[in-house]
Image (tube, rainbow, N blue to C red):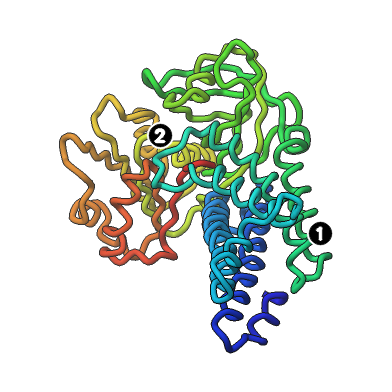
Amino acid sequence: MAFAWPLFASWPSDAASQLRTAGKLTAVLGFTLFILAGLLSVRLPVIDRLFGGLTAIWRVHHWLGALAFLLLMVHPLLLAFAAVPNSPASAAAVLWRPLDHFSVWAGWLALIAMMVFLAPSFAFFGKPDYQRWKLLHALSAVALLAGWAHSAMLAHSVPAMFWHGAVTLCVLVMLYRWVFSRWLACRPYRLESVRMISHDVAELSLAPQTKPLEYRTGQFVYVRHFNANAEAFREEHPYTISSSPDDNVLRLAVKGCGDGSRALVSLSPGDALSIEGPYGEFFPEQRASKRELWVAGGIGIAPFLSRLRWLHQQKAQCDIEMIYCIDRPERAHFLAELQALCEAITGMSLHVHYFQQQGPVSADFLQRQCPDISERQVFVCGPPALMKHLRPILRRLGVRRSQLRSEDFNLL
């Protein structure tokens, strides 16, 4: 904004100059937002807590990228419209220069690269394939470097050193994320056992090979396996920690709904894995709040299972109402252990809600199970459909935004 301000301050009076100035503004702001989005992709465990968790950072990252894309799309159009009063040919010449005008074609290369790697992120194109989406994001480096060349040669309203410094920092961040993080941020683990909870849900127990990971309840990690005979070799995927921070082993709850998850479940004891993290800020404090309501759905039970195991080990006293939402009894993962833990922890109550028998969770149901819901801290983790359904109901019941914490893993 500091470099864009002179363009605002000297706003011209005629329409053509206004369009030209607006075109320059969209370029400066758009490329700056693109660089900021790149910086947020570093995925450092310490940084994510400043934003309230990695999912919060990704939401900001997605919005910055989308806004940058829209601004940079408008940029050449505004410059072309500014030249229309001269002649249509002049407007076309702004967009399509001879091939020896490298600066202009570098801008087009950056814009096309952005179109290719950002398009799958928009809902219009449907749910993207996770690994293809990640590979396409490598084109962000092409867009960054081409945009850098275009801006350094043509954006004279901004000092070249600003672009050089900002882009260099962004390149270093990308190098860390795509190359060096595998050695600097990952810890080696070995698979100890796979406990099948149902036909498609398992809990993996992992043993550290060096210093064990330090984490809090409700956090998650990225896992990569090195069995070349299994699917998703060396691919990283996020999984919620289901063990207590005081356990000697790291346990992960895995639902086999993709190649990566099915590969983990098929591994053999002794197979090597790498763990990166921990991430997330689902439970902001290690101690329990005065009064809480937990709502879990499906594999979203994992962070609550971690919390329950830890509370039991701490012999904690609490005031927590827990609602476990599942479609039918055979999908009640970990139910026997949940019931035993809730009976053993003072002040802990468990309510199971079966969709097929009772229908969707309603405001009446929530009020019956938790009459003082508006006075409690509410934690929700489950499928996106459950979370979308619950948010308006919770608002109607008096739960403020500051009282609600939720977690999801869409394209993490």
Which amino acid does the dot numbered 1 rest on? His
The image shows residue 124, relative to residue 275, as above or below, that is below
Q: How many marks?
A: 2
Which amino acid does the dot numbered 2 rest on? Ile
Looking at the rendered image, the quarter that the N terminus falls into is bottom right
Is 315 or 128 nearer to us in this picture?
128
Residue in the picture at 48% in, 20% down = 262
Q: Residues within 10 Å of mark 2 (few under 14, many from 20)?
A: many
Q: Which mark is residue 164?
A: 1
What is the spatial separation of the Cα atoms under label 1 and label 2, in whole angstroms?
45 Å
The image shows residue 166, relative to residue 200, as above or below, that is below
> Residue 276, position in %: x, y?
66, 36
- The residue lying furthest to the right in this view is 161
Secondary structure under the numbered disc 2 in the rendered image? helix
> Residue 180, position in %: x, y?
77, 37
Residue in the picture at 28% in, 42% down = 351
Secondary structure under the numbered disc 1 in the rendered image? helix
Which residue carries the number 2 mark?
299
- The residue lying furthest to the bottom in this view is 13
Q: Nearer the viewer, mark 1 or mark 2?
A: 1
Is 200 or 357 nearer to us in this picture?
200
Is 264 or 176 nearer to us in this picture?
176
Point out the tag, 1 or 2, that comes first from the N-terminus: 1
> Residue 395, position in %: x, y?
31, 63
Position of residue 133 in the picture relative to residue 334 (left or right) = right
Is 86 or 120 nearer to us in this picture?
86
